[in-house]
Image (spheres, helix red, strand yellow):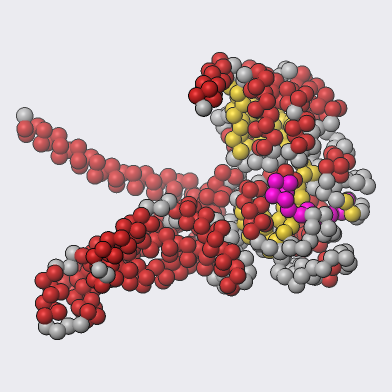
């Protein structure tokens, strides 16, 4: 009897695990299938073609791809150092009571739905940025800032948790040998939690590149390669959110699926590279 | 509170026993459809659910037969209607205004030649104090500020009608951008829905965008004085919308296919547009219910439509539509 249960349990969990793969495969298949007419019509030219004119059935994905990648890069450039700084302060420097309060606040921030960041961006940040750098305050830079604030608490929380796992004995030995705080951080804590930090960056990157609601409001929604990062642009999820319901020609519809497929491939590639390359390097170092 | 809940619940039960109509489509007439549905339910107990998802969505859903009626600002031609097996008739007329937010310039003070409006949207006129604008507005002090152009980011019947107008006043627009529900905009910011464009305009000083007149009223924007077909200045007000609507030449044979931009006449505002209802042809029983609703609205809804900034169809047009219903056995 026990044995039957055991086999049953084994098979059920295996089925659950495999179903993830099946869903992934099905997702990929559907996207590819729906994107097929656009792939046939535009081929890889779609990736570099700048013109997006639905009324003429001409579609190029370059502005959306460009916007996705650049806004994510801006967000990562802003968020990574700040998040690591926060994590260091909370886990190593702050008195415990302060660390507890700020830590809680950061966890709360991480739970805010992204649309709220979008509304804040549109109604508060954009007018402020308009005062600072002119123009209309909507565009890649604004989107990058909103994204960075959105992913920051998330990155900081994970990094802080990782830093807390540094064994006290390691740090104490270093202090005992006369190391300064900076040296302990640089030579003990950060090397120890490197994989945690990179993990948090990857997760945040995944979140930023696929983010829709926070940036739809502040991107400016223009299918153009902006001359500067302060000019309106678009990104893949923003284009999909704006245009799906009204895509009435087959090629239009299919081109949006093509964009979705590209987004999936980009996210996949980023995570795969990060996972297989960085993390393996790290493990080799440790051994 | 309890009373209210009970009232809502009973209303729900009554509605469940009466006809329950579902429609979806254009956002441009949505406010007036909601209003009509409300008074219709109060009067008859029949419920009309309308989802404002955009004209493209309305056409798609009614073609797939997932709803009882679709609504579109872009009329379909006879051939498309035959292919999708749909009936089509107009329900109400609206107008599109060039709404601006220029500090110090009040509603109706700014005059724009139709061609200049096209060049603003083409990105060729970049500043408010451009000579081509100031020469028509000698009494206004227009600032040397960059024009922030606001347009739709989603596909839209409003865009279709606006670009139809621009294509007929500017060859360059016709050649480079053209007519459509979604365009390759040469310049500007995109907002989702009439609401999205409105919020862009109110947020950005020195901006201009095109919205349905009801949204201009709601947000208190200024609307530019444009030109009639023959070049006469014409203000964006209800009298002039009505003057334009008068010239519509409806033909039931073509299922009322008609684009109302640039009608002749001395007081005809140049961008008015009818919005249309689409019905699945085989759906005889339900169509009667839908037609009953619109017939009720034609009889009782004019005042509300006017209040919301729309122009009710003229009586003879309504009669023509009733004739169309009769001819197809819907009435």
Q: Nearer the viewer, residue A116 or B292?
A: A116
For the C terminus of chain B, which image quadrant? top right
Q: Is residue A96 above or below residue B70?
A: below
Q: Nearer the viewer, residue B175 or A180?
A: A180
Q: Is residue B214 above or below residue A141?
A: above
Residue found farthest to the bottom: A178
Question: In which quarter of the view is residue B329 placed?
Answer: top right
**Percent x, y for residue A87?**
29, 67
**Percent x, y for residue B287?**
66, 21
Picture residue at 24% right of the left edge, 65% below the top: A96
Picture residue at 43% right of the left edge, 51% below the top: A113
| Span shown in magenta | B216-228
Q: Is residue B76 magenta?
A: no
- Count of numbered marks: 0
Q: Is residue A223 visible?
A: no
**Percent x, y for residue B137?**
86, 64
Picture residue at 61% right of the left edge, 38% below the top: B52
Question: In which quarter of the view is residue A12 placed?
Answer: top left
Q: Judge from the rendering whether residue A11 lies leftward or rightward of residue A203; answer left or right.
A: left
Q: Is residue B198 visible?
A: yes
**Percent x, y for residue A110?**
37, 56
């Amino acid at each position: 009897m026990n044995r039957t249960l055991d086999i049953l349990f084994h098979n059920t969990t295996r089925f659950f695990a495999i179903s993830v793969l099946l869903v992934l495969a099905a997702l990929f298949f559907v996207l590819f299938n729906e994107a097929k007419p656009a792939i046939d019509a535009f081929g890889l030219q779609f990736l570099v073609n700048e013109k997006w004119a639905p009324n003429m059935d001409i579609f190029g994905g370059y502005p959306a791809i460009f916007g996705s990648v650049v806004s994510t890069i801006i967000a990562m450039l802003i968020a990574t150092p700040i998040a690591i700084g926060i994590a260091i302060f909370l886990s190593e420097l702050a008195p415990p009571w302060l660390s507890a309060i700020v830590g809680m606040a950061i966890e709360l921030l991480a739970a805010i739905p992204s649309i709220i960041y979008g509304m804040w961006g549109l109604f508060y940040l954009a007018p402020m940025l308009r005062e600072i750098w002119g123009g209309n305050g909507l565009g890649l830079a604004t989107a990058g800032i909103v994204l960075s604030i959105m992913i920051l608490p998330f990155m900081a929380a994970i990094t802080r948790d990782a830093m807390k796992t540094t064994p006290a004995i390691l740090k104490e030995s270093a202090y005992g040998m006369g190391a300064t705080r900076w040296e302990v951080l640089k030579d003990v804590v950060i090397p120890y939690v490197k994989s945690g930090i990179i993990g948090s960056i990857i997760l945040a990157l995944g979140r930023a590149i696929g983010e829709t609601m926070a940036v739809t409001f502040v991107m400016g929604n223009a299918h153009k390669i902006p001359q500067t990062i302060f000019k309106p642009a678009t990104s893949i999820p923003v284009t999909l959110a704006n245009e799906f319901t009204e895509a009435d020609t087959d090629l239009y519809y299919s081109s949006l699926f093509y964009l979705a497929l590209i987004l999936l491939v980009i996210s996949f590639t980023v995570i795969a590279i990060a996972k297989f390359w960085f993390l393996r390097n790290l493990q080799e170092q440790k051994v | 509170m309890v009373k209210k809940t009970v009232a809502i619940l009973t209303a729900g039960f009554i509605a469940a026993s009466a006809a329950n109509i579902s429609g979806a489509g254009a956002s441009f007439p949505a406010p007036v459809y909601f209003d009509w549905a409300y008074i219709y339910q109060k009067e008859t107990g029949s419920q009309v659910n309308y989802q404002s998802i955009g004209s493209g969505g309305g056409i798609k859903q009614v073609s797939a037969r997932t709803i009882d009626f679709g609504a579109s600002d872009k009329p379909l031609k006879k051939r498309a209607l035959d292919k999708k097996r749909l009936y089509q008739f107009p329900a109400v007329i609206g107008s599109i205004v060039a709404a601006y937010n220029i500090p110090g310039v009040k509603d109706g003070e700014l005059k724009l030649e139709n061609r200049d409006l096209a060049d603003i949207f083409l990105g060729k006129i970049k500043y408010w104090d451009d000579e081509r604008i100031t020469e028509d507005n000698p009494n206004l002090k227009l600032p040397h500020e960059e024009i922030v152009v606001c347009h739709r980011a989603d596909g839209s019947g409003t865009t279709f009608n606006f670009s139809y107008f621009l294509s007929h006043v500017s060859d360059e627009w016709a050649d480079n951008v053209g007519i459509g529900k979604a365009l390759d905009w040469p310049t500007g910011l995109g907002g989702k829905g009439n609401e999205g464009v409105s919020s862009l305009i109110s947020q950005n000083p020195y901006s201009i965008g095109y919205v349905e007149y009801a949204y201009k009223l709601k947000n208190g924007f200024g609307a530019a004085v444009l030109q009639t077909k023959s070049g006469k200045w014409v203000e964006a007000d209800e009298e002039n919308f009505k003057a334009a609507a008068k010239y519509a030449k409806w033909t039931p044979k073509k299922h009322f296919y008609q684009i109302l931009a640039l009608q002749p006449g001395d007081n005809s505002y140049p961008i008015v547009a009818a919005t249309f209802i689409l019905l699945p042809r085989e759906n005889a029983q339900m169509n009667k219910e839908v037609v009953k609703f619109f017939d009720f609205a034609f009889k009782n809804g004019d005042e509300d439509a006017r209040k919301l900034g729309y122009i009710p169809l003229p009586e003879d047009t309504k009669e023509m539509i009733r004739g169309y219903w009769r001819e197809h056995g819907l009435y």
